[in-house]
Image: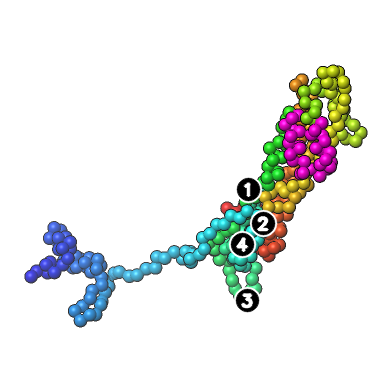
């Protein structure tokens, strides 16, 4: 029996078809392909050819197994409860005003504020365990915002005031309902002019088909109270009436007064409330 007969078929074929290679080279290749050999008496050995060595190719920056979880909650109380359950000394809160989101990153990078004798240095963390509160407009704010900035017919505006008068705190809701009824009663009459009174209210003179003149007095401003965001307590907002007498009747509407400043203040208040309730630092901005 020749030496090539004891080799694996692929190695023997390589030897016969490539005579330029030496037998020793092919034997070395066979040993590398199957380095572990079990001898007749049960001993297991491994070939360690000369010129080969083990080299550690693992990633020194590879993170150990960690939690990968992104939770979205609907209100601040749920965010506080979740953070208090899973946070540790790495956790931080990031409040993004542009996105109207308050996010707790529970496995943020370790801090450097430690005693000098411990010798701890900054360590990279996975930052993949997060809980985020995505703020949503309340139902009340959404209803009023849909009407804001647009002039409406008397009938449409009167019906809206009547349906949503409970959100109005100044003037008295009963006064707003009365105004809504008066607006509805004047549907189809011809408005001649509008005069601002000393009280700040506006009086519109209108004339019926029988040429009977009368006045309709509407306050210049009114104050609303409802939650700006879902799940939050009510906030007061001011609005100004807008009027425009036209040939087909009086057009009415309203505009917010600095409502965006109120929304920003409410957002920051919520962010600091979450930070205070969880004991975590809060950063205003965005995490890349």
Q: Mark 2 points at which residue?
A: 76
Furthest-top residue in this view = 210
At label 2, counting other C-alpha atoms closer than 10 Å, the crowd grade (few under 14, some 14-19, many 20 or more) is many
Quadrant (top left, top right, bottom left, bottom right) of the N terminus: bottom left
| Mark 4 closeness class: few <14, some 14–19, many ≥20 residues within 10 Å | some
**Residue 123: % across, % down:** 56, 66
Write the residue at 23% across / 76% down: 38
- Residue 213 versus residue 165 in the image, above or below: above
The stretch in magenta equals 154-182
Say which quarter of the image contains residue 26: bottom left
Residue marked by disc 1: 99
Q: Is residue 85 left or right of residue 210?
A: left
Residue at the far right in the pictured view: 198
Which residue sits at x=77%, y=26%? Answer: 187
Of marks 4 and 1, which one's residue comes earlier in the chain?
A: 4
Label 4 and label 1: CA atoms lie apart by 21 Å
Q: Mark 4 points at which residue?
A: 82
Q: Mark 4 or mark 3: which is in front?
A: 4
Camera sees residue 21? no
Q: Mark 3 points at which residue?
A: 117
Which residue does the image show at 73% across and 52% down from the upper left?
233
> What element does badge 2 sit on?
helix
Do callouts 1 and 3 mark residues in contact (Cβ within 8 Å)?
Answer: no
Between disc 2 and disc 4, whose residue precedes? Answer: 2
The relative height of residue 131 versus residue 3 in the rendered view (above or below) is above
**Nearer the observer, disc 2 or disc 3?**
2
Farthest residue in the left direction? 1
**Would you say residue 178 sits in the magenta stretch?**
yes
Between the residue at mark 2 and the residue at mark 1, the CA separation in whole angstroms equals 16 Å
Single out the mark in the foreground, 4 or 1.
4
Q: Quadrant of residue 80?
A: bottom right
């Amino acid at each position: 029996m020749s030496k090539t007969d004891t080799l694996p078929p692929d190695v023997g074929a390589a030897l016969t078809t490539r005579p330029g290679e030496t037998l020793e080279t092919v034997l070395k290749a066979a040993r590398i392909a199957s380095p572990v050999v079990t001898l007749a008496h049960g001993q297991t050995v491994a070939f360690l050819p000369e010129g080969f060595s083990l080299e550690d190719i693992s990633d020194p920056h590879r993170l150990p197994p960690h939690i990968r979880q992104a939770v979205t909650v609907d209100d601040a109380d749920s965010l506080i409860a979740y953070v208090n359950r899973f946070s540790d000394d790495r956790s931080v809160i990031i409040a993004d005003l542009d996105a109207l989101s308050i996010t707790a990153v529970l496995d943020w990078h370790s801090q450097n504020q430690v005693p000098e004798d411990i010798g701890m240095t900054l360590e990279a963390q996975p930052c993949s365990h997060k809980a985020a509160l995505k703020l949503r407009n309340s139902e009340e704010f959404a209803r009023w915002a849909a009407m804001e900035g647009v002039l409406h017919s008397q009938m449409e505006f009167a019906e809206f005031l009547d349906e949503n008068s409970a959100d109005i705190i100044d003037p008295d809701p009963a006064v707003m309902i009365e105004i809504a009824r008066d607006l509805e009663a004047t549907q189809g009459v011809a408005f001649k002019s509008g005069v601002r009174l000393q009280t700040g209210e506006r009086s519109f003179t209108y004339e019926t088909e029988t040429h009977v003149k009368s006045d309709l007095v509407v306050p210049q401003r009114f104050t609303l109270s409802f939650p700006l965001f879902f799940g939050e307590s009510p906030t007061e907002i001011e609005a100004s009436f807008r009027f425009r007498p036209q040939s087909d009747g009086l057009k009415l509407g309203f505009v917010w007064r600095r409502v965006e400043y109120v929304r920003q203040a409410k957002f920051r208040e919520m962010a600091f409330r979450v930070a205070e309730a969880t004991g975590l630092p809060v950063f205003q901005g965005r995490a890349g």
